[in-house]
Image: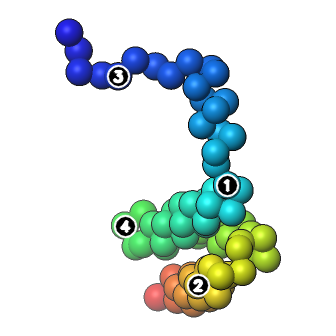
Amino acid sequence: MSGSAPEPTAEQLVEELKKVKVGDLLLHTCSMLASLAYGKLAPETRDLPDAQLAIEALRALVPLVPEADRGGIQQVVSNLQLAYAGAAKPE
């Protein structure tokens, strides 16, 4: 017997999706985009066009984020923009 749980049914997935709050999903998406952007700025995995796309997507989501979290996400965007500028400088 394997230790994996059975696959959820379509009905179970629909029920779980009904519970999801869009604001929570936006925050999760912002977190993922920020992580990806930082990863794309790291010297060993640098991909500036991809980092720029992630930063711009994150910036576009800021006005949609719940107000209580907006300042923190805006600060992340600012930090990423500074990190991008530093990474884009010729050595």
Q: Residue at x 58, y 84 (%)?
A: 72
Q: Dots 1 and 3: beta carbons under 8 Å? A: no
Q: Tell me where residue 29 sits by quadrant.
A: bottom right
- Inspect the image, locate mark 3, and give the three-letter code of the amino acid beneath it: Ala
Earlier-in-chain disc, 2 versus 1: 1
Q: Residues within 10 Å of mark 2 (few under 14, many from 20)?
A: few
- Inspect the image, locate mark 1, and give the three-letter code of the amino acid beneath it: Lys
Q: Is residue 89 visible?
A: no
Earlier-in-chain disc, 1 versus 4: 1
Compared with 86, 62 (above or below) is above
- Inspect the image, locate mark 4, and give the three-letter code of the amino acid beneath it: Glu
Element type at marker 3?
Answer: loop
| Distance between mark 1 and mark 3 Cα atoms | 25 Å
Give the label, 4 or 2, closer to the camera.
2
Indicate the position of residue 25 as horizontal and vertical percent values.
64, 56
Which residue is under mark 4? 44
Residue farthest along the left direction in this orientation? 1
- Inspect the image, locate mark 2, and give the three-letter code of the amino acid beneath it: Gly
Q: Residue at x 60, y 29 (%)?
A: 13
Q: Tell me where residue 62 sits by quadrant.
A: bottom right
Which residue is under mark 2? 72
Element type at marker 4?
Answer: helix
Earlier-in-chain disc, 1 versus 3: 3
Which residue is under mark 1? 21
